[in-house]
Amino acid sequence: MGKAKPDVLQGTLDLLILKTLSHGRQHGYGIAIHIQRVSGEVLRVEEGSLYPALHRIEQDGWIRAAWGLSENNRRARFYEITAAGRRQLALEEKKWSKLTSGVARMLRFA
């Protein structure tokens, strides 16, 4: 059996960020709030996880960032998904589906 990938949770955060940004440009706090709201308050992304992930996936070319003004008229970095990010999102969604299907099969095992 192959070595387990330690980046499953990191990949999950990437998936959530890319999915959020597939609906439009957003600043970091807005991304965190969107994930929390849409998940029914089940998922909460802390700043210490969110901003390093945003920086990493920006370096990967999946998102781009630009400074702008938030709805509170405060300066903030706004993120948007790139074409490469949309392709990565499709891959991440397939991987997530495969993973959850495997877990579901295990939970049904009698």
Image: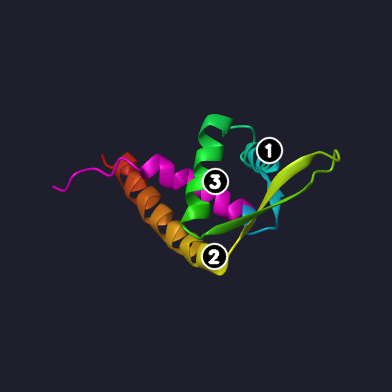
Q: Residue at x 56, y 54 (%)?
A: 18
Type of amino acid under label 2: Arg
Residue 41, picture quadrant? top right
* Nearer-N-terminus badge (3/2): 3
Classed neighbour count for the residue bearing mark 3: other residues with Cα under 10 Å, few (<14), some (14–19), many (≥20): many
Asked if the stretch drawn in magenta spans residue 82, the answer is no
Q: Is residue 46 visible?
A: no
- The residue that label 3 is drawn on is 54
Instruction: Choose top left, top right, bottom left or bottom right for residue 35.
Output: top right
Residue range of the region highlighted in magenta in the rendering: 1-20
Amino acid type at circle 3 is: Leu
Residue, disc 1: 29
Q: CA distance from mark 3 to mark 2?
A: 15 Å
Local SS, label 2: helix
Residue drawn at the location 39% of the way across and 56% of the way down: 95
Comes first in the chain, label 2 or label 1: 1
Q: Earlier in the sequence, mark 3 or mark 1?
A: 1
